[in-house]
Amino acid sequence: MDTFLSAVRMAISAVVKYVHRTWWMLKHHPEMRIGSAAEFKLQKRYLDLRYRIEVEERKNYDEEIARWRREIAVMMNTSKLSSKLL
């Protein structure tokens, strides 16, 4: 029973974290809106990376932040949707 409750607690925590992260990014970056499925996937990854960068900068994770920024740069260079992300 404890294992089941622990799994439920972890699932609820993951959902709350995702909802909070999405709300936080849309609050601070209202230009982000959902369109097609491809746009949605790209924007979801972009929002996740932006959130991580803004939150983790306070913890001085320079190596990971640099890697995420490189991923965003690649995303911007290769995507037809880059104008929607800026």
Image (cartoon, rainbow, N blue to C red):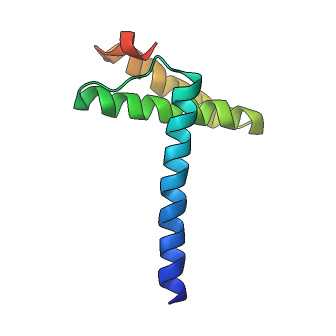
Q: Is residue 31 visible in the rendered structure shown here? A: yes
Q: Quadrant of residue 78?
A: top left
Q: Is residue 79 above or below residue 58?
A: above
Above or below 4: residue 84:
above
Q: Position of residue 68 (x, y in %)?
A: 53, 31
**Figure check: 13 above or below 25:** below
Which residue extends farthest bottom? 1
Q: Where is residue 1 drawn, in percent x and y? A: 50, 90
- Residue at image coords 62%, 31%: 53
Q: Position of residue 44 (x, y in %)?
A: 40, 34
Residue 68 seen in this snapshot: no
- So how many labels did they put on this image? 0
Relative side of 83 to 1, left or right: left
Q: Nearer the viewer, residue 13 or 86?
A: 13
Horizontal and vertical percent position of residue 86: 46, 12
Q: Nearer the viewer, residue 72 or 28?
A: 28
Please identify the quarter of the rendering in which residue 38 is found.
top left
**Left or right of 28 on screen, residue 39:** left
At a point 48% along the width and 31% down the height, the residue shown is 47
Q: Nearer the viewer, residue 71 or 42?
A: 42
Identified at 60% across, 28% down, the residue is: 66
Residue sitting nearer the eye, 22 or 52:
22
Q: Could you tell me which residue is drawn at 41 percent across and 20 percent down?
A: 74
